[in-house]
Amino acid sequence: MRAREGDSPAGASDGPSLPAVGAGLRRRLLRQEGGTPPEAPPARVVAESWPPAPGAAAASARASPRPADGAALVGYMQRRALEQFAGLVEAAAGGPQGRQALKQAIAAVLVEQNLVLAGYTRDALAELLVAEIAGYGPIDPLLRDDTVSEVMVVGPDRVYVEREGRLEAVGARFRDEDHLLGVINRMVAPVGRRIDRAQPFADARLPDGSRVHAIIPPLALDGPALTVRKFTAQAFSGRDLVRLGTLSGEMLEFLAACVRGRLNLLVSGGAGSGKTTLLNALSQYIAGEAERIITIEDSAELRLAHPHVVRLESRPPNLEGKGEVTIRMLVRNALRMRPDRIIIGEVRGEEAFDLLQALNTGHAGSLGTLHANSPRDALVRFENMVLMAGEALPHAVVRAQIASAVQVVVHLARQPDGSRRAVEVATVAPDLGPDGRPALATAFRYFPGRLAFVREPGFTLDPLHRAQVAAAGAALPAWLEGVEPA
């Protein structure tokens, strides 16, 4: 095997990335497998036998460091790791201790064979090889960076991250599309997903709960596109959201009373606005073991702070197009599981019909999220999704059921500075308004120009909602009872 002196990684500023591999790699690999012998090396090229011949370790240790081709080195180390360190490779996925053990084994091989890669210390090279063998390649350091909330890959040579709500380009690179596809398959395969030309997109989650979406050619025109939304190991509490400015203290007090009082609540907003984070925080105000909660999601993200939770996840069809389990199927199954509350990670289709029936038949205190631009739009979109079920219900009947089933809507939005804010909290009257639509009463608004949350003057909770909160044994904030804070 030949390796150029002076090979250096492309863009190592935000995580290790192997050198770009030229067309000669295929020829070198063919020669490695016993093809035609290499021609005489040109100037500045060092002839190398790769992998090293048996018994060459001692001589190698006495010789000068041996420059190695990055891609061939990874292939060699992958084969050797699977042959000799299979247990360590498996353990490396389980936590930092297993990862460190694999790194030490790889470092020992590098010292034994006296191998180096230009631009890397042996420790950095061992870390890079661990990422390639047991991690997620060039983006592995980004996924372990606590300051990064999202990683976005567009083709093999463009990687972006989100930090504090803002996007920025980073220097991590994949060698080529095959390298990127290998990492994507490593992410989706453990949860039973597949991605190929017949099924060119997939959703999955990583072991830490991070959500993965991938789409590949021919649908993605600029090469495979990968998006990983990281999930924080520690869920935010309501007080954390107040400290971060997502909610005001009065907002949290009101929403906590609504959850304790078993009012049905929808969280609306755009992508990345913090809907799931708020849902997790509000779940902390559900009573203890006295309540049984069933969560239903496309890709499990919810981490509820509650002891009695049954988590359900939908499933796509298999290679034969069979075995699909939809959110709607799971909602119907959940109704047979004696739930006190049902929480749907995101309502996005015909399952809204079954959820609406559940909310109107004794499952008070349920929660869900959906994409919308405002509380009013959230109810309109909920109505449209109910009609998608094809049950031919009149619009007036659907609207009346929504007004009866949904009591509170919280709308979140991402601000220009990247922060997330609850820009409006509204309650839904139990009767339709004069226009035949559910009537909304705004309780709080966020004013970006003033950077302030404002409670609407004169807001009060509907008597039916008050009675429901009282029946659940919950207390409303003092200001709702006419007692203003000092």
Image: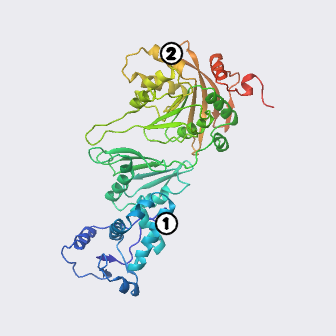
Query: Coloring scheme of the render?
Result: rainbow
Upstream in the sequence, badge 1 or badge 2? 1
Residue identified by numbered label 1: 100
Front residue (pair 418, 194):
194
Residue identified by numbered label 2: 400
Q: Position of residue 67 (x, y in %)?
A: 37, 78
Q: Residue at x 31, y 58 (%)?
A: 178
Whether residue 117 is visible here, answered yes or no, is no
- Eye-nearest disc, 1 or 2: 1
Inspect the image, locate mark 1, and give the three-letter code of the amino acid beneath it. Answer: Gln
Q: Is residue 237 above or below residue 107?
A: above
Q: Residue at x 76, y 22 (%)?
A: 482
Q: Position of residue 206 (x, y in %)?
A: 44, 50
Inspect the image, locate mark 2, and give the three-letter code of the amino acid beneath it. Answer: Ala
Q: Residue at x 39, y 52 (%)?
A: 187
- Quadrant of the rendering where the C terminus is positioned: top right
Rounded to the nearest angstrom, the CA distance separating label 1 from label 2 is 59 Å
Q: Quadrant of residue 11?
A: bottom left
> Could you tell whether 180 is left or right of 30 in the image?
right
Q: Position of residue 173 (x, y in %)?
A: 41, 60
For residue 274, the mark is none
Front residue (pair 432, 404):
404
